[in-house]
Amino acid sequence: METRITQLFGIRYPIIQGGMAHLAFSGLASAVSNAGGLGQITATSMESPEQLKIEIEKVRKLTKYPFAVNFAVGMGRRPYQDLLDLAISEEVPIISITGGNPEPLITKVKNKNIKTMVLTSTVRQAQKAESLGADAIIAVGFEGGGHIGLDDTSTMVLIPKIVDSVRIPVIAAGGLGDSRGLMAALSLGAEGIEMGTRFIATKECVAHPKYKDALVKLTEKDTVIIKRSLKQPGRALRNRITEKILELEQVGATYDDLRAYINGSANKKAIYEGNYEDAYSWAGQVIGLIDDVPSCQELIDRIIDGAIEIKNRFDSIGI
């Protein structure tokens, strides 16, 4: 399966693992890359550049294939400059930029033989990223887990709008988790997909089994969007804590008022301890399509086999 994304990144299949906060480490990233996709580790989940260096070294020991390092930037995020310097010195092949202004990062890695992809949720953001020199766009629709856009535009509408607005390749994200999602994204003009929530429910992800079990058992109706009042909307599992966050937002809570509920420590409580009822954990509407916890190899093989079946079905009806 060859697209501009597979050519750009040197991967077999146009399937990219999202840079999930506190979950995207070397074990998951290398498993995805070994299975033919593009795995990522998230730099801003690291406590120090030294920890990031260790994770990069682990990935390189575990896979000979390309991988990416994600930088989540913006309000409330860990400063990233020292982490970016480390990634550059380690000559990582690809970085992705999510959650904030990509310009400082793209500028710094220019002429460094590092490919860049930027997460966007609007045409304007995509065009800006292209003008800055990004190599690819990740376009995330309203269905996605974690941080999404302000405009509530669905993946089905957003992808063709962004594809029509830029010349660089587009990667679709939001609500995608199987072969049907891959083929739909390609039909909309995207040249690859990024999956976050689906890769949490895999054997190699470090998430607590109870968190993975929740992703299997819950439905697309069991998510809510928090942090709208901070202009950082994100989709998480519905529980008493996310309902509390929504109540506080409705009465004008500030970032400081919400900090204890939305900081990284609260997220870790849910994803590492399995206490997802008493802390927030990100999840997209794609949980309605998740019914097992396979290995990354099993998942990607299934997606590619399913895509071939869909293509054969199209051929059989003359499409």
Image (cartoon, helix red, strand yellow):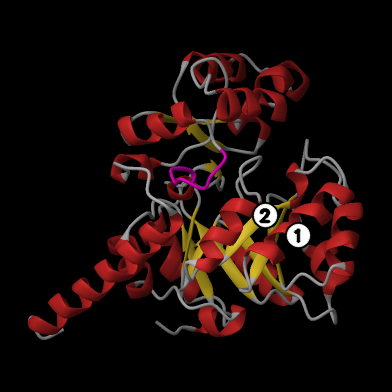
- Could you say which quadrant of the image residue 248 lies in? top right
The N terminus - image quarter: bottom left
Examine the rendering and report whether any part of residue 96 can be seen.
no
Q: Disc 2 designates what residue?
A: 41
Q: Disc 1 designates what residue?
A: 56
Residue 131 point in image, percent of width and height: 72, 76
Residue 120 point in image, percent of width and height: 60, 59
* Rendered residue at 37%/45% (across/down): 286
Q: What are the residue bounds of the magenta stretch?
A: 200-206
- Find residue 80 and name its label: none
Residue 221 point in image, percent of width and height: 32, 31
- Above or below, 283 relative to 2: above
**Mark 2 in CB contact with mark 1 (< 8 angstroms):** yes
- Above or below, 266 relative to 182: above
Q: Amino acid at mark 1?
A: Ile
Is 319 placed left or right of 75 in the picture? left
Specify whether residue 108 is painted magenta. no
Task: Look at the numbered disc 2 and give the secondary structure of its residue.
Answer: strand
Label 2 to label 1, Cα distance in Å?
Answer: 8 Å
Is 105 placed left or right of 189 in the picture? right
